[in-house]
């Protein structure tokens, strides 16, 4: 039986896939959109959408606790209805996922196929026994949590970011393995909901990708809310103790064992590429399973592109969508856009959030830049003081040789929004000196960024 033929096949309905299907069909192409599980991918189902809905609930709980600081009186004890929190989260996720699915199913010339896709040949795909073919194939298959091979972990009921979002009762004692972005967001959220929370990190500091001053400030913020942080944890091991899990650690300080009612493992992610039959299409991967792509996101197989988390060139919703933009512009608009010109930016959604763009001070020095640094604590930002949220600081990194902005970190109220001014300036090639000429709105967090660029120090 001959395969069903399409002009293009898109595998994975995450952030890049549906938009690519829309662009392809708009040119008149017939497209097969294949999704084996949930429409919307990680972001909609187990990433940004559900976690930020929970962050919002946790912020509301914390603000209510602090009402007296603002002269507001709340009658009665504060309570968090965990089931209501999760129901709100599920409602937001369901609406978003349903919107993606409805868009695809209503898209002219797009055939939605649900099932597990595997390559059988360079241009041939099989989905649950059905053969499909296309000259252009786009992979947007995302990633999943890594479960490390640690002593006792196979017998312990550990959670991932996915299963944690499915809980129907609040953990009394949550132990989190991994002191990076996912682990820290959940740590603060569940502490604000009322759980006892301990974060265990092997490294000597949290989120080692950031500068030490950023890591230290975040640790201080979390510990002030009652999150216990254990650093330099070696020989992490697990043992089931009735309905609990004992987590053993060898640290320079603190008890050698922490007992948790629930344990979240958040030590990294891996791409969903091990069951796609990539070898049948001649698609190369690196040692970690990420699909190797060139600067225009083409794989080693002609006519096949890899977009989003599975290519290892970005681990965010916005980078996945930008992958679509780059590939589509080069295919249909005669552009020559490249991934390597992308200015990296991301956020850590604790409260206050960390907005990051470009490279850190540490990275800049490692790359040989002679740098100038500008900093200002949030205690000297009027908007932060007025909001009663003056934790954190703002920091910019500038090349002393050519005045080029290299990066910025804004840890404070609205830091994830305020950092966009720097991101856009970097994209436009605006120098630090030119940035100081801006006349920002008062009172805002962003208004101090030009001032900081005007106060750079070696």
Image: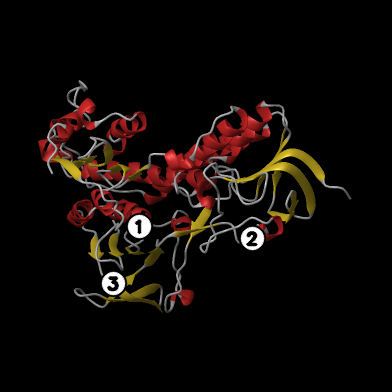
SS at circle 1? helix
In the picture, measured across the screen, residue 120 lies left or right of residue 168, that is: right
Q: What residue would you read off at disc 1?
A: 183
Q: Alpha-carbon distance for marks 2 and 1?
A: 27 Å
Q: Residue at x 51, y 62 (%)?
A: 288
Q: Residue at x 30, y 66 (%)?
A: 201
Q: Alpha-carbon distance for marks 2 and 3?
A: 33 Å
Q: Residue at x 60, y 37 (%)?
A: 18
Which quadrant holds the C terminus?
Answer: top left
Q: Give the camera-side residue of 109 and 169.
A: 109
Q: Nearer the viewer, mark 2 or mark 1?
A: 2
Residue 446's image quarter? Answer: top left
Q: What residue would you read off at disc 3?
A: 233
* Whether residue 261 is situated above or below residue 321 in the rendered picture: below
- Measuring from the top left, give residue 449's x and y in whole percent: 20, 32
Q: Residue at x 50, y 42 (%)?
A: 320
**Pointer 2 or 1: first along the chain:** 1
* Whether residue 22 is situated above or below residue 140 in the rendered picture: above
**Pointer 2 or 3: first along the chain:** 3
Specify the farthest residue to the front.
Answer: 401
Q: What residue would you read off at disc 2?
A: 275
Other-residue count near label 2 (Cα within 10 Å), few / some / many at <14 / 14–19 / ≥20: few
Q: Is residue 201 visible?
A: yes
SS at circle 2? loop
Q: Nearer the viewer, mark 1 or mark 3?
A: 3
Q: Alpha-carbon distance for marks 1 and 3?
A: 15 Å
Q: Give the camera-side residue of 26 and 194.
A: 26
Q: Give the camera-side residue of 417 and 59.
A: 417
* Whether residue 45 is situated above or below residue 215 in the rendered picture: above
How many marks can you see?
Answer: 3
SS at circle 3? loop
């Amino acid at each position: 039986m001959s395969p069903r033929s399409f002009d293009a096949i898109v595998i994975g309905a995450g952030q890049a896939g549906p938009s690519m299907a829309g662009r392809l069909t708009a040119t008149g192409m017939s497209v097969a959109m294949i999704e084996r599980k949930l429409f919307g991918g990680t972001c909609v189902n187990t990433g940004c959408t559900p976690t930020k809905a929970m962050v919002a609930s946790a912020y509301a709980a914390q603000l209510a606790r602090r009402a007296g600081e603002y002269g507001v009186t709340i009658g009665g004890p504060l309570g968090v209805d965990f089931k209501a929190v999760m129901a709100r989260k599920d409602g937001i996720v369901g609406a978003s996922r349903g919107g993606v699915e409805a868009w695809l199913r209503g898209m002219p010339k797009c055939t939605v196929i649900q099932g597990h896709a595997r390559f059988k040949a360079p241009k041939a795909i099989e989905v649950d026994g059905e053969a499909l073919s296309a000259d252009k194939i786009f992979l947007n298959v995302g990633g999943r949590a890594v479960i490390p091979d640690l002593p006792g972990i196979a017998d312990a009921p550990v959670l991932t970011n996915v299963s944690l979002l499915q809980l129907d009762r609040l953990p009394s004692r949550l132990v989190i393995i991994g002191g990076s972005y996912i682990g820290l967001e959940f740590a603060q959220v569940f502490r604000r909901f009322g759980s006892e929370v301990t974060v265990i990190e092997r490294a000597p500091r949290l989120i080692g990708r950031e500068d030490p001053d950023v890591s230290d400030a975040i640790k201080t913020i979390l510990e002030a809310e009652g999150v216990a942080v254990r650093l330099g944890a070696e020989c992490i091991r697990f043992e089931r103790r009735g309905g609990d899990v004992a987590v053993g650690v060898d640290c320079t300080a603190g008890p050698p064992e922490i007992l948790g009612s629930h344990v979240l493992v958040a030590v990294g992610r891996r791409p969903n590429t091990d069951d796609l039959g990539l070898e049948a299409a001649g698609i190369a991967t690196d040692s970690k399973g990420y699909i190797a792509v060139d600067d225009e996101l083409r794989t080693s197989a002609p006519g096949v592109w890899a977009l989003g988390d599975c290519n290892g060139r970005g681990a965010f919703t916005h980078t996945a969508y930008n992958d679509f933009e780059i590939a589509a512009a080069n295919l249909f608009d005669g552009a020559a856009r490249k991934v390597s010109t992308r200015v990296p930016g991301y956020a850590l959604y604790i409260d206050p959030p960390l907005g990051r763009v470009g490279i850190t001070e540490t990275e800049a020095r490692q790359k040989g830049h002679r740098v100038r640094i500008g900093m200002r604590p949030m205690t000297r930002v009027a908007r932060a003081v007025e909001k009663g949220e003056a934790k954190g600081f703002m920091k910019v990194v500038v090349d002393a040789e050519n005045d080029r902005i290299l990066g910025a970190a804004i840890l404070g109220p609205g830091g994830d929004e305020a950092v966009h001014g720097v991101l856009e300036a970097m994209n436009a090639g605006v120098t630090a000196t030119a940035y100081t000429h801006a006349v920002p709105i008062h009172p805002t967090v962003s208004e101090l960024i030009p001032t900081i660029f005007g106060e750079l120090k070696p």
